[in-house]
Image (cartoon, rainbow, N blue to C red):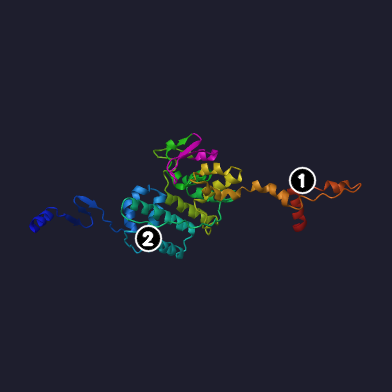
Amino acid sequence: MKTDALREFSSHAISYTASFGAGASYNSGIFTVVESFSISELFEKYKNILWEDGNHKYNVTFFIGELNEILLGQRFSAFDQSTLDDLIGALRERGNSNATINRKMAALSKLLRKAHKMGDIHSLPEFRRQKERAGRIRFLEHAEEDRLFGAIRKRCEDCYRLCIFLVDSGCRLGEALGLIWNDIHGHRVSFWITKSGRSRTIPLTVRAEQVVHVERAHRKGPFSMLTAARFRAIWNEAKAEVGLGADEQVVPHILRHTCASRLVQGGIDIRRVQMWLGHQTLQMTMRYAHLATSDLDACVNVLDRECYRPHSPKKHGDDEDDARVVVPGAAISNRRSASLSKNFG
């Protein structure tokens, strides 16, 4: 009886084999064995899937490299919350602003979510966006533009053309350099390869239209003879020449800020500015909303005590006093000029 039972058990024996690093099989079923990866190894695995070639991918490469350096190349199969918190703390100690931390964490989050989806890691932390302060937006005055562009033109005519196009179109440097001839249709230009992934078409100013219509000479586009590195090098030389070398905010991206600022100050509503710049969310465009100061001019007429005086009972024959009860809002600039002349003349 015992022999029969043993024979029956042996005939139903479970076959189990394990192959480390490649998974384990159980009755021909496969169990996934989670391996350990460093951040840089995951990036090499998925960078060409998650990011297109260009400036953004170039920046992300440095972001991931820095994060991997902070973690000392540590490999992991699960990325826990404490590791993420330590990473953010280390970045803050290095002097990174919340805005910079958010950009680096966005790259890390995108990478880890892909790795999690593909089974490379089995848990993810919660990424919380750091609160960003609204920083000062620097833009070029017309006089600064003339001086800077003049110095650039002395060094490189093509770089000068690119400056004109950037400040009048508000596009990103990579978008301009990536233009091909088919993207230009008369007085309009289409941007197909954008940071947000959304294409857009905008009209061109007279001078922007002039600088893109140049001799093609077997070139792919109006600015294909330039590289970002060369343009930035010439920009920095010209910037130093005109006395702006110490201003860290005077970088090529300031031309995009300048375009946006001029649109808002010129009375263009914020939604149209968003469409022009190609911002993915209206919140990004709202950084420029405070420049629409003309919308608030009417408030001064209500608040300024010199513009409005309470009505007082009219005295007989006092027509002159009665005429000064309310000062029209249109006369506010004249009144201020007289006041300034009195105090500082």
User: In what quadrant of the picture does the C terminus appear?
Assistant: bottom right
Helix, strand or loop at label 1? It is: loop
User: In what quadrant of the picture does the N terminus appear?
Assistant: bottom left
Residue extent of the magenta highlight: 186-211
Rendered view: 297 above or below 35: above
Question: Which residue is depicted at the point 60% across and 49% down?
Answer: 291
| Residue beneath disc 2 | 80
Relative image position of residue 311 (x, y in whole percent): 82, 49
Q: Residue 94 magenta-drawn?
A: no
Q: Identify which amino acid the numbered label 2 is placed on.
A: Asp
Task: Identify the residue at the far front of this view.
Answer: 1
* Label drawn at residue 328: 1
Task: Identify the residue at the far bottom of this view.
Answer: 93
Q: Residue 210 magenta-drawn?
A: yes
Q: Is residue 71 visible?
A: yes
Q: Identify which amino acid the numbered label 1 is placed on.
A: Pro
* Label drawn at residue 226: none
Relative image position of residue 149 (x, y in whole percent): 53, 48
Between the C-alphas of marks 2 and 1, the distance is 66 Å
Q: In terms of depth relative to the viewer, which is nearer, 117 or 111?
A: 117
Mark closer to the chain start, 2 or 1: 2
